[in-house]
Image (cartoon, rainbow, N blue to C red):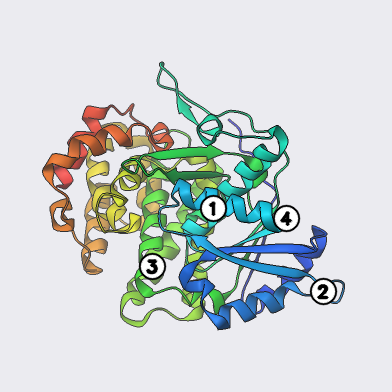
Amino acid sequence: MRYVRRTQRVFWGRGSLSRLGRELDRLEAARVMVITGRTLGENRDVRTLVHSATRTTANSTRITEFFPGATPQSPVTAVEATVDAIEEFSPDALIALGGGSALVTTRAASILHGEKQASGTANLEDLCTRRSPEGTFVSPRLRAPKTPVIALPTSPTTAVSTAGCALTTDEGGARLAIYDPAARAQAIVLEPRLLITAPTSVTVSSSLNAIAMAVEGILSRSATFFTDSQLGHALGTLLDILPDVPSSGGTPEQVLHLALAATSVGDAAETSGAGLSAAISHTLAHRIRASNGVIDSLILPHVLDYLDPVSDDRKDVLARSLNCPTGDIRQRLDSFFCRLGLPRRLRDLHLPESALGDAARDAMTDFAVTSSPRTITQADALDVLRAAW
């Protein structure tokens, strides 16, 4: 077995945003583009905070441009518009400011822009991971230089530390996956003053997504001693803190630790994988008005039922992280989600039963299914969806 550590600089705690300018100095960036969503882009306090942090004594004239083009579910059209903005402004570095969609949009734009610059043209679909006739997923090697990315997350997202990104198309919301290690954020800054700007619902949903990914990562066929260590500790942190958040929004310290846990989960998931819950929530999120995390929490117990016959050797590890007997894993998680007042049936999210077949089909095109300890078929995914419905 092997475990490959990736080079990435992470700064956290109040005042950590002061490191942003020095990281830009390291990149010798004179022109910086901040890619964010509309809400943060219109937040004068956040813009001032970030803009001030880009300046240093070594470079007090650094030019910073804000582009509020990121939108939920990272549609291809938003990525293409961001590439157009990058071509017009010619930045030396990109800053992803926001939640998962801003981070994914920035990475994807860096990839598409780099490949386009190298070849003169770039068809997005040619850059994507594809499933071969044999059922394996194949990612093309993308060798063009990429504009470096620095991540300023505003929620506890697992997307902050990864190299992959998944985009939705305009035709029915199908997903395109792209993987390029060169687009991974070279630095991550977890600043509580930014993390507390997210609505409570976003903080909760992002944390739920991290919980589901940690659980399936521990059960994964690709799990290792190192991923178990990361995921187990992160899972315990998420379960300890999250119940306090819905009523109060969480303290800056609590939200920071949720973000640290989610960052750790995202890092480990590059090895362990995301799992069937993620594949299903990815395909459902654009069909119903519910966040990935809420869908993850609803699907996960049913995925555990599906995995139960083949996960005996991993359940002990998961049970220790959950601090419960092996036989109580499902009940422990289901009770946790119920305490948060989350919906427990897909029909309660207004998903019609007629949509389950298409959702199962689309889930099989998601790279996340490859890490399951069982070989998943479309019929299996449909069974899980029916049980959850």
> Horizontal placement of 31 versus 73: left or right?
right
State whether residue 5 appears in this view: no
Residue farthest to the top, as pictured? 134
Please identify, in this view, whether the residue under mark 2 or under mark 3 is nearer the observer.
Answer: 2
Tag 1: Cα neighbours inside 10 Å, few (<14), some, or many (≥20)? some
Name the amino acid, label 2.
Thr
> Horizontal placement of 151 versus 346: left or right?
right
Provide residue 41's location: percent of width, then percent of height. 53, 72
Ranked by sequence position, the earlier of labels 1 and 4 is 1
Name the amino acid, label 3.
Val
Residue drawn 61% across and 38% down?
3
> Horizontal placement of 135 versus 341: left or right?
right
Q: Quadrant of residue 136?
A: top left
Q: How many numbered dots are placed on residues in this image? A: 4
Give the Cα separation between the discs numbered 1 and 4: 14 Å
Residue under pointer 4: 90
Q: Which mark is residue 202?
A: 3
Q: Which mark is residue 81?
A: 1
Above or below: residue 103 compared with residue 168? below
Tag 3: Cα neighbours inside 10 Å, few (<14), some, or many (≥20)? some
Provide residue 265's location: percent of width, then percent of height. 49, 53
Q: Are marks 2 and 3 in contact (CB under 8 Å)?
A: no
Give the Cα separation between the discs numbered 1 and 2: 27 Å
Give the Cα separation between the discs numbered 2 and 4: 16 Å
Please identify, in this view, whether the residue under mark 4 or under mark 3 is nearer the observer.
Answer: 4
Secondary structure of the residue carrying tag 3 is helix
Residue under pointer 2: 61
Residue drawn 34% across and 54% down?
292
Above or below: residue 344 compared with residue 164? below
Ranked by sequence position, the earlier of labels 1 and 2 is 2
